[in-house]
C-alpha cells in the first residue's frame, strides 16, 4: 500500500526526489566515507514530514520504541543489521542485557521489547531483560499485547559491572531514554559497553544540538546534490531558562517565533507556496509527543492560559521544561484511508531496516500526530528504502521511500556527530 500524496506533483518535491535519484552514486559514496570516520548509534528512528515541497526530519529518537510496528517481512534486515552492529562494536559479545522503560502497563511497548529480544537473539546473543523499576525485586513475567511472555529481572551490581543474578553480560543495550536521570546502577561502569552511551539520554541530550548538527549535514548534502538545503532542513531557534508557570521567557519565544515565521514566509514566496507557515514550540529535551505547541503567530505564545502553561511545563517522567526549541513546522500532505499520516524510518547501525506510517484521524496536516489517538500502518512500507528505480516516476513508491531513507540517514549521521561531540566533551 502506498499512501496518497495530496498535493501537486510538480515543483520542488519532484526536483528534490529527482536530484536524489540522479546523485545516488555520490550520495552512497558520501555515506560510506562518513562512516569511516564516525560510529552510528546502535539504533535510531526518524520522524519525517513530507509537505509536497519539502521532506524534512522533525524528530530523531535514539531509543526507538516502535519495532513492533515494523512489518514482519523486514525481520531479516533487522537481524543482519544487528549482527553488523555487534561485530563492529563488541565482536566477542555473547550475553546482552536489555534495559527497557520501567513502565509495564503499556502492552504495545512491551510488544516492541519482545520484537527487540527476538532480533537480538537471532543475531546470536543471549538476551535477558533487566529493569530499573524499583518495585520489581524478583523475576517478574509480563505479557505484551500479542501475548508474548517477558521476564523482567532486578539489576545486580558487582563493582564496575552490571548484570542480573547469574548473568554477567558483555554489553548493555538501553531502550530507556533516561528522562528521569541517570540511575546510580548505570554510573561508573567502565568494564562494559553501554549502548547508546549515557550522554544520549534526555538528561544531557538536547534537540537543538541535534538540529545544529543536521544544519551542517544538510549544507554538505546541498553541495553534493545542488539542492537548496531548506528543502530538507527545518529552521529552528532556542530559548533557555523558560518558565511557563512564571511566564518567564515569553519575549524570547515571541521573538524566535516571529523570526522563524518571517524566514519561512520568504521561502514560501520564493517557491510560490500558498500554505500558511507555522512553527512548533517544544521542550528541548524529552519525547513521547509531550510539551508541544503549534504556533502560526508570535502573539500565540504570549499570555498562555493555565491549561496551555501546564501542558508545556512538564514532559515524560515529570521532567520540568526549562529549555525550548522553536522549530519550523513542516506540513504533512500524506494520507492513508483519509487520515493524515507521516513516515517514521527505523535504522539499526547505519542501515535502514524499515518504516511505518503514524496516522491520526483527528489531526490536521499542520498538527502533531504523536498524540493520543494515533495509530500505525506497518504494511505501508511494503517496499524497503534501499532499492530506488530511476526509470519510473520520481514519486513512485520505491523512489519516494528511497528519498525517505536518504533523509533519515542524514539525520542518523547528524546524531552520530552530535554524540561524538558530546562524548569528546565528557
Image (tube, rainbow, N blue to C red):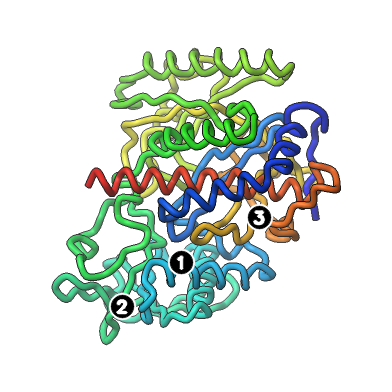
Viewer-closest of 319 and 113: 113
The x and y percentages for residue 71 are: 67, 65
Spatial CA distance of label 1 from label 2 is: 17 Å
Q: Are marks 1 and 2 in contact (CB under 8 Å)?
A: no
Q: Are marks 3 and 2 in contact (CB under 8 Å)?
A: no
> Mark 2 Cα within 10 Å, few/some/many (few <14, many 20+)?
many
**Sequence-first disc among 1 and 3:** 1
> Mark 1 Cα within 10 Å, few/some/many (few <14, many 20+)?
many
In the displayed structure, does residue 179 sit left or right of residue 335?
Answer: left
Q: Nearer the viewer, mark 3 or mark 2?
A: 2
- Whether 15 is drawn above or below 418: the answer is above
In the drawing, what numbered circle is on residue 399? none
In the drawing, what numbered circle is on residue 85? 1
Check the image and name the residue furthest to the right. 392
- Whether 422 is drawn above or below 367: the answer is below
Viewer-closest of 338 and 170: 170
- Could you say whether the residue bearing mark 1 is in a helix, strand or loop? helix
- Could you say whether the residue bearing mark 3 is in a helix, strand or loop? strand
**Sequence-first disc among 1 and 2:** 1
Q: Residue at x 58, y 65 (%)?
A: 68
**Sequence-first disc among 3 and 2:** 2
Asked which quadrant contains residue 261, the reply is top right
Q: Nearer the viewer, mark 1 or mark 2?
A: 1
Which residue position holds label 2? 169
Q: Nearer the viewer, mark 1 or mark 3?
A: 1
Residue 93 visible from this viewpoint: yes
Amino acid at each position: 500500500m502506498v499512501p496518497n500524496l495530496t498535493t501537486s506533483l510538480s515543483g520542488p518535491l519532484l526536483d528534490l526526489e529527482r536530484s536524489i535519484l540522479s546523485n545516488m552514486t555520490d550520495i552512497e559514496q558520501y555515506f560510506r566515507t562518513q562512516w569511516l570516520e564516525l560510529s552510528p548509534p546502535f539504533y535510531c528512528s526518524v520522524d519525517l514530514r513530507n509537505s509536497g515541497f519539502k521532506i524534512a526530519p522533525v524528530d530523531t529518537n535514539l531509543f526507538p520504541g516502535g519495532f513492533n510496528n515494523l512489518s514482519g517481512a523486514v525481520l531479516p534486515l533487522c537481524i543482519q543489521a544487528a549482527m553488523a552492529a555487534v561485530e563492529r562494536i563488541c565482536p566477542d559479545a555473547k550475553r546482552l542485557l536489555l534495559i527497557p522503560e520501567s513502565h509495564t502497563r503499556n502492552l504495545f511497548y512491551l510488544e516492541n521489547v519482545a520484537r527487540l529480544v527476538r532480533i537480538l537473539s537471532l543475531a546470536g546473543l543471549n538476551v535477558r531483560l533487566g529493569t530499573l523499576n524499583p518495585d520489581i525485586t524478583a523475576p517478574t513475567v509480563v505479557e505484551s499485547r500479542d501475548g508474548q511472555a517477558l521476564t523482567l529481572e532486578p539489576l545486580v551490581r558487582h563493582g564496575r559491572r552490571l548484570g542480573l543474578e547469574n548473568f554477567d553480560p558483555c554489553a548493555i543495550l538501553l531502550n530507556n531514554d533516561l528522562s528521569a536521570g541517570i540511575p546510580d546502577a548505570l554510573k561508573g561502569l567502565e568494564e562494559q559497553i553501554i549502548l547508546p552511551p549515557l550522554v544520549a539520554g534526555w538528561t544531557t541530550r538536547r534537540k537543538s544540538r541535534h538540529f545544529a548538527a543536521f544544519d551542517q549535514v544538510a549544507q554538505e548534502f546541498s553541495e553534493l546534490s545542488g539542492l537548496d538545503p531548506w528543502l530538507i532542513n527545518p529552521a529552528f531557534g532556542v530559548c533557555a531558562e523558560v518558565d511557563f508557570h512564571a511566564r518567564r521567557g515569553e519575549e524570547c519565544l515571541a521573538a524566535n517565533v516571529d523570526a522563524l515565521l518571517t524566514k519561512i514566509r520568504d521561502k514560501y514566496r520564493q517557491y510560490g507556496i500558498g500554505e500558511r507557515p507555522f512553527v512548533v514550540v517544544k521542550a528541548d529535551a524529552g519525547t513521547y509527543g509531550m510539551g508541544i505547541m503549534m504556533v502560526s503567530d508570535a502573539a500565540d505564545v504570549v499570555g498562555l492560559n493555565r491549561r496551555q502553561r501546564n501542558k508545556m511545563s512538564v514532559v515524560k517522567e515529570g521532567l520540568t521544561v526549562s529549555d525550548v526549541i522553536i522549530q519550523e513546522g513542516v506540513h504533512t500532505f500524506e494520507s492513508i484511508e483519509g487520515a493524515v499520516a507521516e513516515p517514521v524510518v527505523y535504522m539499526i547501525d547505519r542501515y535502514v531496516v524499515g518504516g511505518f506510517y503514524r496516522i491520526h484521524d483527528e489531526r490536521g496536516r499542520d498538527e502533531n500526530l504523536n498524540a493520543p489517538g494515533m495509530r500505525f500502518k506497518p504494511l505501508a512500507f511494503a517496499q524497503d528504502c534501499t532499492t530506488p528505480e530511476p526509470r519510473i516516476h520520481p514519486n513512485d513508491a520505491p523512489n519516494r521511500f528511497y528519498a525517505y531513507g536518504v533523509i533519515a540517514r542524514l539525520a542518523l549521521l547528524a546524531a552520530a556527530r552530535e554524540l561524538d561531540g558530546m562524548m569528546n566533551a565528557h
